[in-house]
Structures are given as C-alpha cells and as structure tokens.
Amino acid sequence: MKKKVLLLALTLLLVAGMTGYGTWAYFADTEQSLANTFAAGTLDLKVSDDNQPFGDGVSETWVLTNMAPGDVPGVAYEVSLMNTGSLAGSHVEIAFSHAIDEALNPVESDTNRNSTWQEMARYIEIQYMDYDGIVFTGAGATSGHAIVDANDNGWLDLEDVTLPANAAALDNLPTPLPNGGNTKSFHVRLAFRPEAGNDLQGDRLTTTVTFTLNQDASQ
C-alpha cells in the first residue's frame, strides 16, 4: 500500500514538471495615438435691424415718440437673427421685459407720477407679430404659437407677452443655420390704444426683446 502511494505521488510530480516545460514566450509591440484634441463648438447668435448690421445686440429698433391715444404707426418693425457659430441650435425662444421712465419725464398733466411698466405696457397693442413665418397673433396664428390676452383687457399687448401664459407660444422656434448659413426674421407692429389715459402722459416705456438660441430641446 505504501508503494502505491509513493508511485502515485511521483507520477504527479513528473506530470507537473512536464507541464512547466510546455510554456511559450510571445512578442508584443505597442504604438500610441498622439495629439488628440477635443474642441467645443460654439453657438453665436447675432442680430440686426433696419438701421444696424449684425452684431451682439441692436438698440432703438422700435422708436415711437410723441404718441397720442389711438395712434397706429402701421409700421412692422423687423429684427433678423443669424448663427455665426459652428454648432446647430435646437430652437430659439423669445422673451420680453420692460421698464418705465417716470421720474425723468414729469409733466403737469400726468395724473399718476408712479405708473408701473405694466400700466403702460398694457396700452401698447400688438397688432401683428411673427417669426420666420410663424404667426403669433390673430385668426391666422400658427397652432401652438398663438399668444393670448393674458391680462384680460380685450386686446394683445406688451404686458401679455411677459406673462407665463404666453411663454410656450414664444418658445421652440426655428433656428438659423450655423456658420451664417441663413437668417430668421422677427416682425412686430404696435399701436397706442385709445383707452390710454392722462396717467401715462409724458411716460416712456423701454422694451427689451431677448432672443435665445438653445442647443438642446430640454432647454
């Protein structure tokens, strides 16, 4: 019995030794991919109007002076948009903000020396507004982009477009192509409502229209 055990052990050692002699060596060669760079593209929105070339902003596109209640200038003001960046945008959104100049324009007949911008903006009617063929106003308004009388005064005005009820209508608009490939145009025609009273005499409303070019649909 002892001999069988010893022989078995010896046989296992021999097999293990023979396995060691069967190991091979392999060649290897390594190369590298060098000078890889990762550069972010750009979204670069430029705007222009009838009086100023494309740039990072324009001013005094719409100037209505010496207005009287019931005035209808009848002019559709235009702002054009261009993307000079290298990336395509997902959509454009438009936002309005206003400020009123009361203190610097005091007049005796002004019955309210503390008018708010809302009190003046609601009397400046938006008769027509569009962007790249998408109409925001009237019976022909584009589905999903019709602005509503959010302040319930009976007409569309510059206060309405600042209110949350109209945010979606002014969003998800077509973008100009990258690298200056084309332009998109925004138009608006305004009027001073005949209902405006003496409390607005001498007041001046300054309006800022902000166009945002967004990269992603989630923005």
Image (cartoon, rainbow, N blue to C red):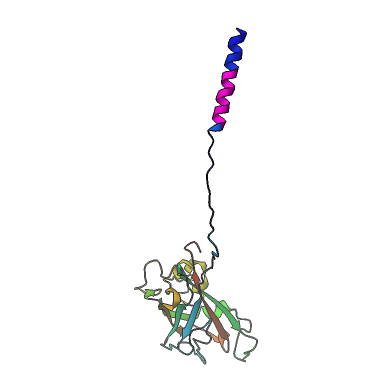
Magenta span includes 108: no
Up the image or down, 55 lies above or below 153; here it is below
Secondary structure predominantly adopted by residues drawn in magenta: helix
Q: Indicate the quadrant where residue 118 lies.
A: bottom right
Up the image or down, 216 lies above or below 79; here it is above
- Whether residue 99 is visible here, answered yes or no, is yes
Q: Which residue, as the protein is rendered here, is positioned at the far top? A: 1
Magenta span includes 18: yes
Q: Which residue, as the protein is rendered here, is positioned at the far left? A: 140
Residue 209, given in percent of the width and then of the height, sits at 51, 78
Q: Which residues fall within the magenta stretch?
A: 10-20
- Quarter the N terminus occupies: top right
Q: Indicate the quadrant where residue 78 lies.
A: bottom left
Q: Indicate the quadrant where residue 180 lies.
A: bottom left
Q: Which residue, as the protein is rendered here, is positioned at the far right? A: 103
Residue 90, given in percent of the width and then of the height, sits at 45, 67
Direction from residue 209 to residue 147 in the image, left or right: left
Number of numbered discs on residues: 0
Residue 48, given in percent of the width and then of the height, sits at 47, 84
Residue 26, given in percent of the width and then of the height, sits at 52, 44
- Whether residue 155 is visible here, answered yes or no, is no
Residue at the spot 55% in from the left edge and 24% down from the top edge: 15
Direction from residue 207 to residue 81 in the image, left or right: left
Residue at the spot 59% in from the left edge and 18% down from the top edge: 10
Decide which of 25, 183 is in the foreground and name it.
Answer: 25
Residue at the spot 45% in from the left edge and 88% down from the top edge: 50
Decide which of 188, 210 is in the foreground and name it.
Answer: 210
